[in-house]
Amino acid sequence: MDEVAVQGVHAVAVRDGKGHLDTAKVELTYRSLRILPPVGKQKRYPALSLTVLRARERDAPADRPRIDWKLLTDLPVLSNEDAIGKLRWYSVRWKIELFHKILKSGCKAEEARLRSADRLVKLIAVYCLVSWRVFWLTMINRSAPDIDAGIVFTEREQKILNFLIPNKAPTTPGSNTLGIYLTKVAKLGGYLARGGDPPLGNTVMWRGMSRLIDIALGSEIAPQLVGN
């Protein structure tokens, strides 16, 4: 690919070492290749016509690793628009990995001891909904932290969070936004919320949501147990 001339430049959004958004300009190069199977398997498998796509920053930045992506696809890449489209698909890959991380490490789907495929499918379906919510909460905190907290949290959940993690300074009515409550949830999961800390991550969010759900459930059944 070093022999291929630069065919376009594209701007991608990245985060620096401190989690702050930045814009990187990558040079695009792409070309088609015909890949042969191993010699001993050429009678069993056909040759593949693939496109090699490379996106590379011209200069290495000081505060993060240099972007140098090399992608292989069997889809046609005939223009810069096609190349940018494939890059956008690739940029979603890490979000898919994070979703799987929540599913496996947060919900612990791999530790299920169900003995039938039907029950396991139903359990994973529920876990997918839970994992999606945790992932969505993490992402919406970065894109729309100023929306109303009532869109996500019930009135009971907001009262619990306000009791457990009160605001450091008095707030005016309507000023408690979703971002404020998501930070409180993250604090339940171990987030310190210091000035130099990175944005909320999925790990602290699923820990915090797990604690919040348990506390909310306890607050609902406690009056019935104690009789008042």
Image (cartoon, rainbow, N blue to C red):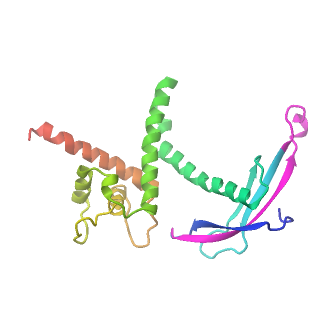
Which of the 4 image quarters holds residue 194? bottom left
Q: Is residue 146 above or below residue 118?
A: below
Residue 27 colored magenta?
Answer: yes
Pick the residue in front: 106 or 70.
70
Residue depicted at 64% across the width and 56% down the height: 88
Going by the image, does 27 lie left or right of 49?
left
Query: Relative to residue 8, is residue 92 depicted above or below?
Result: above
Residue 134, given in percent of the width and then of the height, sits at: 43, 49
- Is 210 in front, or is 81? 81
Does 96 appear above or below 201?
Answer: above
Q: Which residues are magenta?
A: 19-48
Q: Quadrant of the N terminus?
A: bottom right
Residue 126 falls in which quadrant of the image?
top left
Query: Is 188 in the magenta?
Result: no
Q: Is 155 on the left-hand or right-hand side of 109?
A: left
Is residue 108 visible in the rendered image? The answer is no
Q: Residue furthest left?
A: 228
Horizontal relation, residue 212 to residue 54: left or right: left
**Residue drawn at x 44%, y 72% as measured from the top left:** 196
